[in-house]
């Protein structure tokens, strides 16, 4: 595993196909309300949208590892980033803050063992930690959101697992829509280059925003009306080469002014209804070293 940041060229990534996570119209009908989806996804359209997402990643040269072990999983398993974290010592298996997702880390562990990816450890009770709250800036600096999905005990365990050579920057997250809503650190910040990040500042803690600026990171501000459509959830497949959801023209224009190459994807069924954008749909394992 290499490239402990969110913007170097993506070379290896885990995806969970919609066919496995959503499985059938019957599973969708059983689960979508309990999982706080805003509406039931259309299975056929969801399959097509996820296939286009995977094609966009593969077209840029990344190797896709497919997790098709759907035993005990829910619709949320498609948001593969949340159940594990990449670290210099190996993968860390999360303990999910959303109880319905409890089986996902074990499913990912079986995949990692089968493809020879080392596991450094796992988050144990009472700790909770989800991957959407973890943002690497370089090999020695990682930010972790402290919210309803990631608690102090989980952050303390992560600090021990990454070791003394890594600075762990804790970012207190706002209450926003409450404990039943999906809100991660990556809901409001997506680094897309060493010195560029997409942010939604109205929900960003002032000390963290100041920390980004002090590091020389320019901020692409997401317009207020594009936060709900996940304008801040942007996956970099290389420096200033990004995948984002369509329907965010203001954010896209600001990215392009900053020199980014932007590709937009349809996400009505796989993202907007379940609350997970392109970063959530991917678990990067490796990014090419500079």
Image: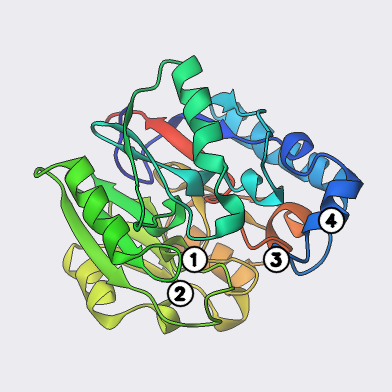
Earlier residue among tags 2 and 3? 2
Determine whether the residue tagged by mark 1 lies in a helix, strand or loop: helix
Residue contact at pointers 4 and 1, CB within 8 angstroms: no
- Dot 4 surroundings within 10 Å: few (below 14), some, or many (20 or more)? few
Residue contact at pointers 1 and 2, CB within 8 angstroms: yes
The residue under label 2 is 200
How far apart, in angstroms, are the residues tagged by discs 4 and 3? 29 Å
| Mark closer to the observer (1, 3) | 1
Residue 99: give x, y in percent of width and height: 56, 58
Earlier residue among tags 4 and 1? 4
Q: Which mark is residue 212?
A: none
Q: Residue at x 18, y 62 (%)?
A: 215
The residue under label 4 is 30
Determine whether the residue tagged by mark 2 lies in a helix, strand or loop: loop
Q: Residue furthest front?
A: 125
228 relative to 39 in the view: left or right: left
The residue under label 1 is 187
Q: Quadrant of the C terminus?
A: top left
Comparing 240 with 145, the one in front is 145
Q: Residue at x 45, y 82 (%)?
A: 175
Residue contact at pointers 1 and 3, CB within 8 angstroms: no
Q: Quadrant of residue 269?
A: bottom right
Determine whether the residue tagged by mark 3 lies in a helix, strand or loop: loop
């Amino acid at each position: 595993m290499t490239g402990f940041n969110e913007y170097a060229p993506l070379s290896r990534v885990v995806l969970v196909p919609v066919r496995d996570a959503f499985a059938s119209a019957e599973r969708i009908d059983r689960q979508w309300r309990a999982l706080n989806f805003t509406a039931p996804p259309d299975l056929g359209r969801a399959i097509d949208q996820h296939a286009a997402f995977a094609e966009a990643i593969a077209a840029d040269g990344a190797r896709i590892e497919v997790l098709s072990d759907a035993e005990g999983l829910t619709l949320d398993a498609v948001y593969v980033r949340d159940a594990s974290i990449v670290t210099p010592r190996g993968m860390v298996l999360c303990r999910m803050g959303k109880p319905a997702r409890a089986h996902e880390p074990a499913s990912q562990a079986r995949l990692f063992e089968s493809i020879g990816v080392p596991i450094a450890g796992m988050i144990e009770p009472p700790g909770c930690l989800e991957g959407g709250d973890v943002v690497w800036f370089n090999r020695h600096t990682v930010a972790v959101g402290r919210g309803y999905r990631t608690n102090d005990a989980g952050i303390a365990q992560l600090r021990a697992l990454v070791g003394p050579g890594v600075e762990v920057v804790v970012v207190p997250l706002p209450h926003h829509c409450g404990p039943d809503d999906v809100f991660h650190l990556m809901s409001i910040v997506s680094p897309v280059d060493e010195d560029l990040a997409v942010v939604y500042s109205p929900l960003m803690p002032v000390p963290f925003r100041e920390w980004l600026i002090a590091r020389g990171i320019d901020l692409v501000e997401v317009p207020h009306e594009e936060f709900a459509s996940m304008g801040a959830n942007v996956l970099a497949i290389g420096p200033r080469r990004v995948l984002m959801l369509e329907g965010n023209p203001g954010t896209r224009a600001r990215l392009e002014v900053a020199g980014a190459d932007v590709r937009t994807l349809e996400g009505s069924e796989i993202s907007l209804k379940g609350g997970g954008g392109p970063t959530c749909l991917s678990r990067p394992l490796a990014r090419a070293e500079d």
